Image (spheres, coloured by chain):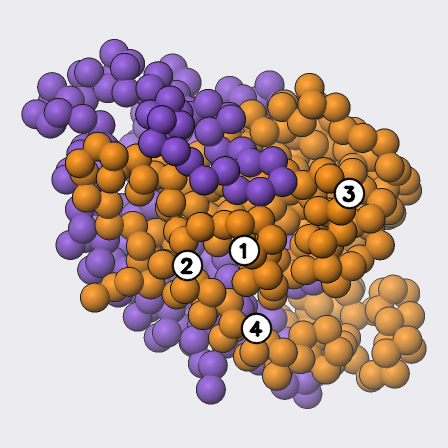
Chain colours: A orange, B purple
Amino acid sequence: MIKEIKEHRSIRNYESTPISQEVLDQLLESATRASTTGNMQLYSIVVTQDAEAKQKLGACHFNQPMIAQAPMLVTFCADMNRFSQWCAQRDAAPCYDNFLWFTNATIDTVLASQNFALAAEHEGLGVCYLGTTVYTAKSIIELLDLPKGVIPITTLVVGYPASTPPLTDRLPVRGVVHYEKYNHYTAEQIDEIWSEKEQSEETKTLLEQNKLDNLAKIFTQNRYKAADNIAISKSFFDVLVAQDFFNQK
Amino acid sequence: MIKEIKEHRSIRNYESTPISQEVLDQLLESATRASTTGNMQLYSIVVTQDAEAKQKLGACHFNQPMIAQAPMLVTFCADMNRFSQWCAQRDAAPCYDNFLWFTNATIDTVLASQNFALAAEHEGLGVCYLGTTVYTAKSIIELLDLPKGVIPITTLVVGYPASTPPLTDRLPVRGVVHYEKYNHYTAEQIDEIWSEKEQSEETKTLLEQNKLDNLAKIFTQNRYKAADNIAISKSFFDVLVAQDFFNQK
């Protein structure tokens, strides 16, 4: 298990080989065994396999080529709708249309998605998480016909790998772990934590490609620009409100 | 791997046996191998082992007896502080103090926590997620001395199990999975999805204990009451704003 966890890499090249229902059922069952708030299972898993539907949904993820290659997209959604509907049918007044339950359901959703991802890798499949889910949540809601009380949180591309890239680097473990209290980083510690990453050949190549003088600027000036961050923040929060996750009166 | 995932149960009785640093290092490294937004690792992991510190932190989790028994609490925090500090030191203007990055960092945090949990179970340890983390986020921030840009999302109790309970039930997989589009549940489908759970011996016992006539009312009237939900929603959102995750001007 630990070996498999440590072997994880995001796969961005896929074979078109379909995933059997038998294998998919294993992954879905694995997802539902994850820990969940009060055993309420506050998520829904939407499987997209139809080629046309996958293409339309792929437009919400900037039409990355891997989406056309892979046989499956799986959208993991925070879902208070199903539980609230059950309560209403049982004459029990639900009160889950607020930010606490957005948070609880989001945690449930990601726990389920990670079980799914690890089970998929165990079955020889590759996966890639798509952060674009949050950027285009409104369009995804329309395409998947999600009702109020449901909001997409993350998406997995799933398929058999056409190629397996090397492991990506990580900050040293000591850089993200704290004992007893938070370690308020000194400037020297920050330098030390990032030093290996900043000196890697990969970074040197990136800096040449991006014509920038350090790695941090690639993040702030190219990958995640301030104006985009603010615009997406607002649009995703608006979607959250529209989907009934912020009725706090 | 899949077998282990399917064997997960939350452990609520622990031996006091300590966890070796060697084992802990395996779990921490497993956590850092999880997928992460742009390979930014937007989380911090705070390990609490000191008995007095564990007792104080335990008060934020309603002093559940398992917290005193188990040798370790691990608080998983969404962290934009470390990355922003690095950017600032590199003359790259960070803009991560907004709701988009609360969401991205929360997803990163939960992916890391689930890797940690599964690796722990692989090592023969038991875990239990504490949803109370969100309820008392403000007190946890004070106790762990978390700076702005950091907010606790979830906590794991970790230790060797003193007893292993039976697997808890789940809704049938078909009840939480949708193909191509969201299945707008009919009343009959909701009844069918919950029927096994509602008819179980466990539910009958719960109804007698709670003196209520159906399971849904146990959730709405006892476990998660409307007034509490609203109060916690507001307090957690206030904490999020205070920790600089909502500067969207």
Amino acid of disc 2? Gln
| Residue A179 image offset from top left, x and y in percent | 47, 54
CA separation, marks 1 and 4? 16 Å
According to the picture, the residue beneath numbered tag 3 turns out to be A51
According to the picture, the residue beneath numbered tag 4 turns out to be A232
Circle 3 Cα neighbour tier, 10 Å, few/some/many (<14 / 14–19 / ≥20): some
Which residue appears at 60% of the width and 35% of the height? B179
- Ranked by sequence position, the earlier of labels 2 and 4 is 4
Can I make out residue B7 in this image? yes
Asked which secondary structure carries label 3, the reply is helix
The one nearer the camera, A185 or A170, is: A170
The one nearer the camera, A107 or B20, is: A107
Circle 2 Cα neighbour tier, 10 Å, few/some/many (<14 / 14–19 / ≥20): many
Protein chain holding label 3: A
Amino acid of disc 4? Ile
Amino acid of disc 1? Ile
User: Can you say whether B18 is above or below A84 in the image?
Assistant: above
Q: Are marks 3 and 2 on the same chain?
A: yes
Asked which secondary structure carries label 2, the reply is loop
Q: Nearer the viewer, mark 2 or mark 4?
A: 2
- Ranked by sequence position, the earlier of labels 3 and 1 is 3
According to the picture, the residue beneath numbered tag 2 turns out to be A243
Q: Are marks 2 and 4 on the same chain?
A: yes
CA separation, marks 3 and 2? 28 Å
Can I make out residue B57 in this image? no
- Contact flag, marks 1 and 4 (Cβ < 8 Å): no
| Residue A170 image offset from top left, x and y in percent | 71, 56
- Contact flag, marks 3 and 1 (Cβ < 8 Å): no
CA separation, marks 2 and 4? 16 Å
